[in-house]
Image (cartoon, helix red, strand yellow):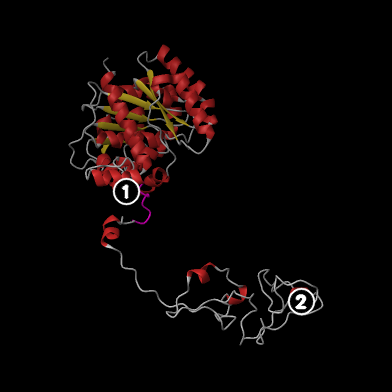
Amino acid sequence: MHDDGRYDDPRVTGSTSDPVSRETDYPSWSPGATGPSNRPTDSDPPAPLDPSSGPAQPEGSAIPEPASGRRTPEASSRPVNAAEVRSTSGRRNTAAAVRFEPAVPHQPTAAAARDAVPVVADAPVASTESLAAVAADPTYVSRETPTREEDDPPLAMEAMRAVQILNPSGEVTMPRPDRTRVMCVANQKGGVGKTTTTVNLAVALALHGNRVLVVDLDPQGNASTGLNVPHHTGIPDVYDCLINSVPLAEVAQAVEGIPNLWCVPATIDLAGAEIELVSVVARESRLDRAIAAYPGEFDYVFIDCPPSLGLLTVNALVAAQEVLIPIQCEYYALEGLNQLINNINLVRQHLNPKLDVSTILLTMYDRRTRLADAVEQDVRNHFGDKVLQAVIPRNVRVSEAPSYGQSVMTYDPGSRGATSYFEAAQEIAERGVKEPVGRNA
């Protein structure tokens, strides 16, 4: 709009950068008038607006102005003319715009104040039936009232889970088996969560009253890293037990901050143990003898295997009575599972008749994909009750914990990863009580 009140009509200038709204009312003509002379054409520019006078109104359409200055209902129901709308510069287009005065606050009656219902932001709207029930019975509780633990605030739920997992008082304990359960965590496919499962299950059981020993049989030494146990060159490790027949008690180290948990570390020297064990007598049972000669009593012994089916994994299978297989919820993890089961059957037939695949744990479960559901259904249909009900989801806290030399149970006990591993450990403990399995069974 120009200073003299004129609009730039794109029909005349040919410009569309400042289009005129279809609702713009030209004072030189009215919608009710007929005839070509009253309506502007493409060749005639719009007539300028006179600031001193309002737009032409049909007869009888004047807005009555009450004495108090407030708009009457008739005025508020009339369609607002575009010329009366406040312009972009903040000024009114006409001088005949309706004036507004602040209204006097409405004073509610006593009955209206008594029947008023306070409204809370983001709260569900109460139904008429609920309000009537509350008026009839003050103790009435609506079905929409959150009464479950899942409806608690997220921070409160996370704090409750953290206290349950860390168990600072030590009063909550998981069932302890009658005999030592030696469990081999094996899968020849790498990256399925063997080490992560070993560390977190061991910590969860140790925090709840079980005596646990972790044997790191992987030359990478990741289990030792996750438990913050030194495993650099020169530290006595599991290699000395396998090759030099050093007692396991001289090699095991207590895990700092976790009572009832010990770890036998692994160094890079273990990488050459497969070659050196070839010429050793009874090479397949070296680890079994070392564990049997340990003077202390453990409730659980977890053996973290390397991602291969070499002599180190065979030693672990001979020393164990149970096999725990972590399975990643992807197709590649299923592809190599047949070969692992065949090797376990060979060890059972020739070296360790007590060996049994007792536990299957699904890891890295992504609920957003159909593939994860399909893999879970295939594994449950094939293995049945051996598959734990607890499923380990993809959780960044599980991956962050080893960089701080901790398990996820102590790094972030309120996370979904810690909760899932805690449930898996509890399920394993309960199964051990119902079906006791031990070295002398």
Q: CA distance from mark 2 to mark 1?
A: 68 Å
Is 10 on the left or on the right of 384, as rendered? Answer: right
Is 274 in front, or is 281? Answer: 274
N-terminal of the pair, mark 2 or mark 1, is 2
Q: Residue at x 76, y 80 (%)?
A: 45
Q: Is residue 125 magenta?
A: yes
Q: Residue at x 72, y 76 (%)?
A: 29
Q: Main secondary structure of the magenta part?
A: loop
Mark 1: which amino acid?
Answer: Pro
Image quarter in which the C terminus is found: top left
Residue highlighted by disc 1 = 153
Crowding at label 2, few (<14), some or many (≥20) Cα neighbours within 10 Å? Answer: few
Is 316 on the left or on the right of 381, as rendered? Answer: left
Up-down relation of residue 395 to residue 347 (above or below):
below
Secondary structure under tag 2 reads: loop
What span is colored magenta in the figure?
120-127
Residue highlighted by disc 2 = 38
Residue 382 position within the rendered picture, expressed as x and y whole percent measured from the top left? 47, 19
Image quarter in which the N terminus is found: bottom right
Q: Is residue 157 magenta?
A: no
Up-down relation of residue 25 to residue 218 (above or below):
below
Up-down relation of residue 291 to residue 440 (above or below):
below
Secondary structure under tag 1 reads: loop
Crowding at label 1, few (<14), some or many (≥20) Cα neighbours within 10 Å? Answer: few
Total label count?
Answer: 2
Is 68 in front, or is 440? Answer: 68
The quadrant holding residue 396 is top left
Residue 135 position within the rendered picture, expressed as x and y whole percent measured from the top left? 25, 47
